[in-house]
Amino acid sequence: MKKLKKLSKNKKHDFNVVIIYGTVAVGKFTVANELQKIIKYKFFHNHHTHDLARLLFKRESVHLSRLIENTRLLIFKEIADAKINVVTTHAYSPTFISSTKLTDPMYMKKIEAIIKKNGGRACFVHLVADNKEILKRVLGESRKNSRKLKDKKIMKEILKENIWKIPAPVKNNIQIDNTDLSPRKVVKIIIKHFEL
């Protein structure tokens, strides 16, 4: 486990949003699901918006990207306005640029700004794991009934670049290598670090 930015623990916040991010199949959904069960936060999974947009538009189309981005940012604005505690996920790549020209680092900073502006605290959790473990997880049973990536060849191409280990340029950020950690152990680290 590597602490990337020192967390200000003394400041009180109106609400928390825990953003669990990382590459495809690193375990974001599994960890987020486990975390929300323990701390009783609402769970907003990134595929909620992605799957909705895919019902209407083709992958890589500007309409798909715009709908996903606008919907997600609107949801974060409503979360911040309502000041509710939420766990969410995001498939992050530091070099990703959507067809609307929004980069992943810019997107993460927008989320952070929305939460902070409304008196909340964004708690970023960057999950990383060994390539072999990720290639095993991409074929996992939990991915079969969803629109998630399930192709080992495509996953190998994603992992080749190695950029997915670069964290988002945000504050209150912790990086956890969950190669050999159970979801429960990862959750304990998150709870302790952010004092949730």
Image (tube, rainbow, N blue to C red):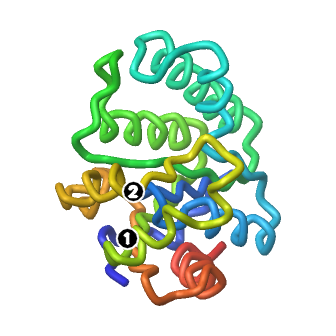
**Position of residue 161 in the picture relative to residue 86 (left or right):** left
Residue 10, given in percent of the width and then of the height, sits at 53, 72
Q: Quadrant of the N terminus?
A: bottom left
Q: Is residue 118 above or below residue 154?
A: above
**Residue occupying image coordinates x 63% and y 13%:** 56
Q: Which residue is mark 1?
A: 128
Q: Quadrant of residue 83?
A: top right
**Residue occupying image coordinates x 33% and y 77%:** 130
Q: Amino acid at mark 2?
A: Thr
Task: Report crowding for label 1: few under 14, some 14 to 19, many 20 or more residues within 10 A (C-alpha).
Answer: many
Please report whichever mark, 1 or 2, sits nearer to the chain's N-terminal start.
2
Residue 66, given in percent of the width and then of the height, sits at 48, 15
Q: Quadrant of the C terminus?
A: bottom right
**Residue occupying image coordinates x 41% and y 69%:** 134
Q: Residue furthest left?
A: 161
Q: Is residue 186 above or below residue 24?
A: below
Q: Which residue is mark 2?
A: 23
Q: Amino acid at mark 1?
A: Val
Q: Is residue 180 above or below residue 43?
A: below
**Residue occupying image coordinates x 51% and y 73%:** 9
**The one of 96 and 133 positioned closer to us in this rendering:** 133
**The one of 80 and 71 positioned closer to us in this rendering:** 71
Give the SS element for disc 1: strand
Q: Is residue 1 above or below residue 95?
A: below
Residue 108, given in percent of the width and then of the height, sits at 40, 42
